Image (spheres, rainbow, N blue to C red):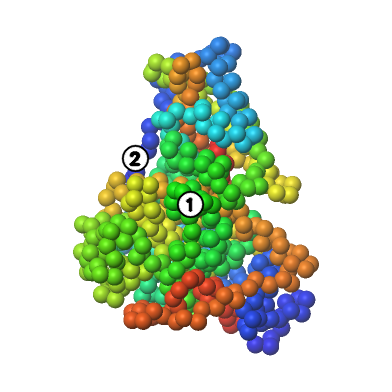
Amino acid sequence: MTSTRNVLSDGTKIEDLIKVDTREVQMRALSDHEIYDLEMQRVFGHSWLLLGHETEIPAENDFIVRDMGSDSVIVARGKNGQISVSLNVCPHRGMKISTVDAGNTPIHKCIYHGWAFRPNGEFLASPVEKECMHGTMMSKAELSLEQARVTLYGGLIFATWDREGESFEDFLGDAKWYFDILFQRSDKGLEVLGPPQRFVVRANWKTAGEQSAADGFHTLTLHRWLGEVGNYAKSGQEGGADLSPEMIGVEVSSPHGHALRCIDLGRKIRKLTGLDPDVLSVDQKLDALPPPGVTREMVPQLKRKLSEDQLKVLVSMPPQVGGIFPNVLFAFVYIPQSDGTVLGLTLLHAYVPKGPDQLEFVNWVLAEKDTPQELKEKMLRQSIQLFGTSGMVEQDDSDTWPHMTTAAKGARGRKSTLKYQAVYATGAPEGWPGPGIVNEGFTKDDTQWHWWLHWHELMLANA
Amino acid sequence: MTAIQALPTADLARGECVPIGSDTYNQVLGFLYREASLLDAIKLKEWSALLSPELIYTVPLRQTRPMAQHAASIIRTVQHYHDDYRSIMGRIMRLTETKSAWAEDPPSRTRRLVTNVQVSTTGVEGELAVVSYLLLTRSRFDSPDLDLISGERNDVLRLVDGQLKLIRREVILDQAVLGTPNLAIFL
């Protein structure tokens, strides 16, 4: 731990970037090139990273090109439907092999010297076989594309470069119990409603990453418009509706930096049914307000796939927003509509690091495969109107992160600290059935703090 | 992946070319210039008066695809904008009637440069199909760099009581990855 590999060039120890007792993070972490380079190896080199959903490449030989940290990868479906993730770098002279975003091909051929690879990354041949352009010093197996470890979870494609690291299941840890409620709740599972939106924000990836680890407080001010004229507005309320009731719920932290904000559905169910949610059964609540993308007809699927305890959480305090470490946000939100109904939306974002000062915002819109077409279209439109590129909620977020990144470059600013000092003292609600680090009440900073602690742990552990 | 039906786009092939410099062409040009100046001056309510209640307003995604699959580079499932008159009016309400539309407060300084205008009839009485190029420059805060948004607008305008109204706009952007942090502005 005292190795010089854990000391930055100006003598600062990585250990000291975080003050554990006062819950502070040095702001230089949001802009420093040296820290960024280390993150690419220690955080992005060792974490499971979200690359997409298998429904983006449904057929044999389909492929998409995505990023794992600072590396481009080819995500391809080969024979027998197997999905492989290959480093998108030709082992010959380093040319990017696939220069497009998506397509279908049985052979990925480098345009530079013609080396050819199968969808699973296997080196097939170089041109003019008898001249043996690839020499005889290395076997064809050695000249294949570098393979990442791949796992599918609820159809989501995750990959890691850490071949000996923990399993995906261990990576999710206790949080898996909650993520299963979102990603493993229907017979046929989720699907993407199209390719992801992509745009660049001139901000460090961690500004978005730490916010995704369930910053509840920012909704009150940054998303104030929601109470003024947006979906939470109430007529006759001077200065807009009070958003603070939406801040109350249960927050789940994870030693792996995952985070879930479980927000009370009681008020919505009371409004829809006119009844006290405490007297309603699980079935009655599912009937009144099934989760995003799920219709009443699909409710029996939930009961087959989820445990009684998971159903209890789903109908009363469902995980609505949060993060998968290091750079994923999920939103499974219940949006009030002007006609008094509620429309659920399901989205995932990845914040792909593109240098210390830039991230690529990748936004997938999803629905259950079984969601009726008409509902899918409604979900898609409202997702686009509220989230992602032109989304009225998230356009305010993406305008905030660049300022933090710039501030973190100042001679004084870089020594300032981010503070996570709103600490829960409540613990889990009585009878809460789920695992993990659980606290109830008005939102606090604990989930984000645990995100930073895991970042810190990886930055020190993988030296 | 579910193939969500693409919205009908202006079918330019059906119509007849409206000559450059003709009265109708000039009227269309006047409409596009007025629209650009209202948007750049952030007179959004005045701009909304140019919109038909039937408006469909979309901005597809783009992907990098091989030459042989160029048409597949335009994605109309998930899009950047997928709006109608009602949702555009909702966006205008957020920008003009709240104190916390931070993405445009302080506002961007923008220029919508509209060129290469081609007008044709659509086969529907009183309707015109208009193709134009858009170069939108966007300046935020104290950055000397301009965000550039370039693309082709495919519009349908309709004459209503002698006034042109926008009933359809699809903007085909050039970037697969947009170089601006959001589209809190109209294209």
Mark 2 or 1, which is nearer the eye?
1
Labels 2 and 1 positioned on one and the same chain: no
Q: Quadrant of the N terminus of chain A?
A: bottom right
**Residue most extreme to the bottom:** A2
Residue A173 locus on image (x, y percent): 42, 79
Q: State whether residue A428 appears in this view.
A: yes
**Does residue A103 sit above or below A207 in this rendering?**
above
Residue neighbourhood size for the residue with mark 1, other residues' Cα within 10 Å, grouped as few (<14), some (14–19), many (≥20): few
Q: CA distance from mark 2 to mark 1?
A: 40 Å
Q: Secondary structure at mark 1?
A: loop
**Residue type (three-letter) at the residue carrying disc 1:** Gln
Residue neighbourhood size for the residue with mark 2, other residues' Cα within 10 Å, grouped as few (<14), some (14–19), many (≥20): few
Q: Chain of mark 1?
A: A
Q: Quadrant of the C terminus of chain A?
A: bottom right
Q: Residue at x 57, y 59 (%)?
A: A221
**Residue type (three-letter) at the residue carrying disc 2:** Gln
Residue B22 locus on image (x, y percent): 56, 11
Q: Which disc, if any, is residue B31? A: none
Give the labeled residue for mark 2: B5
Residue B13 locus on image (x, y percent): 42, 22
**Does residue A119 sit above or below A39 in this rendering?**
above
Q: State whether residue A345 appears in this view.
A: no
Give the labeled residue for mark 1: A237
Q: Is residue A149 left or right of residue A272?
A: right
In the foreground, A108 or A390: A390
Q: Quadrant of residue B25?
A: top right
